[in-house]
Amino acid sequence: MRMTKQKKLVFEIVNNSYEHLTAYEIYQKCKEQIPSISLGTVYRNLNLLCDLKKIKKLEMKDKTERFDNIKEKHSHFICEKCHKIIDLKDNITLTPDVSNHKVTDYEIKFYGICENCLKEENNG
Ligand SMILES: [Zn+2]
Ligand SMILES: [Zn+2]
């Protein structure tokens, strides 16, 4: 993959992050390195990197998009109270009926209340 300076930076930020950043947050981090970079350039490179399967886009219930590294296959737990996204190590075995289709990828999101919010609920 030929990488421009901008694309490389966008990729490195997402690939080294476990925070599930939004495009705008990635843009702000990019600006620290390349002050002249535009939000449009960041968006374009994010979509390009998704198409190339170098990073992954997570679409949230509230329609926001977040970007994630794909260094290790993992699922997500999303807290419905504080909206925190927690990575889960994937040791899930699925036996879906996919008949003659060939599965190339899957995505699982669990929704619930995170540990911290549960503690707060019990204390209050
Ligand atoms: Zn929470
Ligand atoms: Zn993740």
Image (cartoon, helix red, strand yellow):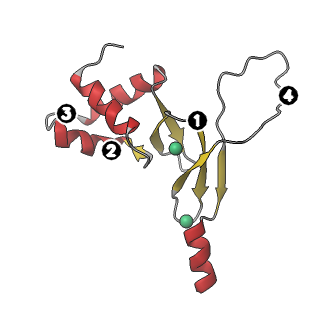
Q: Which residue is mark 4?
A: 97
Q: Could you say which is closer to the camera, residue 14 or residue 59?
A: 14
Indicate which disc, 3 or 4, sits on the residue closer to the N terminus: 3
Q: Return the x and y of residue 46 as percentages of the image width and height.
A: 38, 30
**Of circles 2 and 4, which is in front?**
4
**Of circles 3 and 4, which is in front?**
4
Distance from label 1 to label 2 (Cα)? Answer: 25 Å
Indicate which disc, 1 or 2, sits on the residue closer to the N terminus: 2
Q: Which residue is mark 1?
A: 73
Q: Amino acid at mark 1?
A: Lys
In the drawing, does residue 113 fall left or right of residue 41? right
Q: Could you say which is closer to the camera, residue 89 or residue 46?
A: 89
- Residue at 54 percent of width and 41 percent of height: 59
Badge number at residue 24:
2
In the drawing, does residue 75 fall left or right of residue 14? right
Q: Which residue is mark 3?
A: 37
* Badge 1 vs badge 2, beta-carbon distance below 8 Å: no
* Badge 2 vs badge 3, beta-carbon distance below 8 Å: no
Location of the C terminus (image quadrant): bottom right
Q: Secondary structure at mark 1?
A: loop
Q: Amino acid at mark 2?
A: Tyr
Q: Secondary structure at mark 3?
A: loop
Distance from label 3 to label 4 (Cα)? Answer: 46 Å
Q: Amino acid at mark 3?
A: Ile
Indicate which disc, 4 or 1, sits on the residue closer to the N terminus: 1
Indicate which disc, 2 or 3, sits on the residue closer to the N terminus: 2
Q: Amino acid at mark 4?
A: Asp
Q: Return the x and y of residue 81 as percentages of the image width and height.
A: 57, 66
Distance from label 1 to label 3 (Cα)? Answer: 30 Å
